[in-house]
């Protein structure tokens, strides 16, 4: 049986502050002045296209969450439907608009198709013991996603500064970047509250470990092509130069909560393999095109 903790009230207040202090970015505040469009496109075109698609597809993610978490709390529902989704969708529109300013095609995003496996799991999630495992995995996946985004936007901001592209760095990338840590904090606090309150038992944790290790997914990558494209984000931003350190940072929460009993597992093997394989596949495809 779960017991309410002070964290639950802290999480609710955090969601309220996020909504009040970080409304969706007004598109009119973006300054798309670009000094050297060809250089920006060459360096960040692939990244912009991928991240714009992922951000816009939160519309579908909301449908998936409503399916997967039928007994969600009002705090969770308010976060993903009223705070997170509007912010993220606006991020996607900003990135897509920037891409089009650089001469790129509009992104093609899937905002409506809920995968069959999500629908099946959603039916099982009506069982309370399954629901809580799904909820924990939602928080862990969200935390890893936001950490990945924070690393990516930080690298983009640094790169744009190097190119002297002050306007789009400040009004697009940095404006987005400042909203991501609050999302990560929600997932982290929520996962920690589940364990502190006793909402999840030992065998449920074991099931969560099993599912996470066998069904680990990269952000926005549902197909082999999308996984390769995710690898392109890693490579083009230079994150592969110190990949283990970055994956350790991305996976820190699940390492602490799922694998604390496992000595010497600072980086889950499945997470590192996912990033490495995606980066490898992208390099192979890139080299083939260049040959």
Image: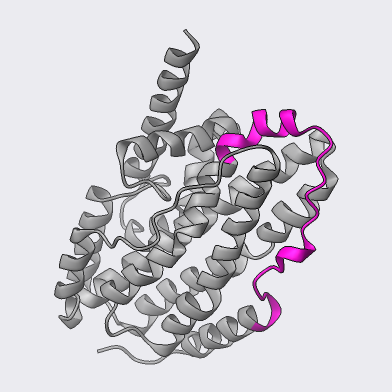
Q: How many marks?
A: 0
Magenta span covers which residues? Answer: 20-47
> 180 or 113, which is in the foreground?
113
In magenta stretch: residue 141: no
Q: Is residue 221 left or right of residue 172?
A: left
Q: Please name the residue shown 65% across and 56% down the image.
A: 94
> Looking at the image, is 80 positioned above or below residue 27?
below
**Quarter where residue 171 is shown:** bottom right
Give coordinates of residue 52: x percent, y percent.
55, 51
- In the image, 86 versus 244, the foreground residue is 86
Query: Which quarter of the rendered picture does the N terminus lie within?
Result: bottom left
Residue 165, horizontal then vertical, whole percent: 82, 41
- In this image, 169 relative to 103: left or right? right
Residue 19 falls in image quadrant? bottom right
User: Which residue is nearer to you in this view: 138 or 88?
Assistant: 88
The residue depicted at 44 percent of the width and 66 percent of the height is 59
Q: Position of residue 9 (x, y in %)?
A: 51, 90
- Scheme by which the image is coloured: one colour
Q: In the rendered view, would you say 265 is above or below 261?
A: above
- Taking the image as shown, residue 187 lies to the left or right of residue 132, namely right
Q: Is residue 216 above or below residue 278?
A: below
* Magenta highlight on residue 38: yes
User: What residue appears at the point 27 percent right and 81 percent down from the top-left corner?
Assistant: 70
Please give the name of the residue rendered at 32% of the width and 47% of the height, measured from the top-left corner.
222
Task: Give residue 120's quadrant in the image.
Answer: bottom left
């Amino acid at each position: 049986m779960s017991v309410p903790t002070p964290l639950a009230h802290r999480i609710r207040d955090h969601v309220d502050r996020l909504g009040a202090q970080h409304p969706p970015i007004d598109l009119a505040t973006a300054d798309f002045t670009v000094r050297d469009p060809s250089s920006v496109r060459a360096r960040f075109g692939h990244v912009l296209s991928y991240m714009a698609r992922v951000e816009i597809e939160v519309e579908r993610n909301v449908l998936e969450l409503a399916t997967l978490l039928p007994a969600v709390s009002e705090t969770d529902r308010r976060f993903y439907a009223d705070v997170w989704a509007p912010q993220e969708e606006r991020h996607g529109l900003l990135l897509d608009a920037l891409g089009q300013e650089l001469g790129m095609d509009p992104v093609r995003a899937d905002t409506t198709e809920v995968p069959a496996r999500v629908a099946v799991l959603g039916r099982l999630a009506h069982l309370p013991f399954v629901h809580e495992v799904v909820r924990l995995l939602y928080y862990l996946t969200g935390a890893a996603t936001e950490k990945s985004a924070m690393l990516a936007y930080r690298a983009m901001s640094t790169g744009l500064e190097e190119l002297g592209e002050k306007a789009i760095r400040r009004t697009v990338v940095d404006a987005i970047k400042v909203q991501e840590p609050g999302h990560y904090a929600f997932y982290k606090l929520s996962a920690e509250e589940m364990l502190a309150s006793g909402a999840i038992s030992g065998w449920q944790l074991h099931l969560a470990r099993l599912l996470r290790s066998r069904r680990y997914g990269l952000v926005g990558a549902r197909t082999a092509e999308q996984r390769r494209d995710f690898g392109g984000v890693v490579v083009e931003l230079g994150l592969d130069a110190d990949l283990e350190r970055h994956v350790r940072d991305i996976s820190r929460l699940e390492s602490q909560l799922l694998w604390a009993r496992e000595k010497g597992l600072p980086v889950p093997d499945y997470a590192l393999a996912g990033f490495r394989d995606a980066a490898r596949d992208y390099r192979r495809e890139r080299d083939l095109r260049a040959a």
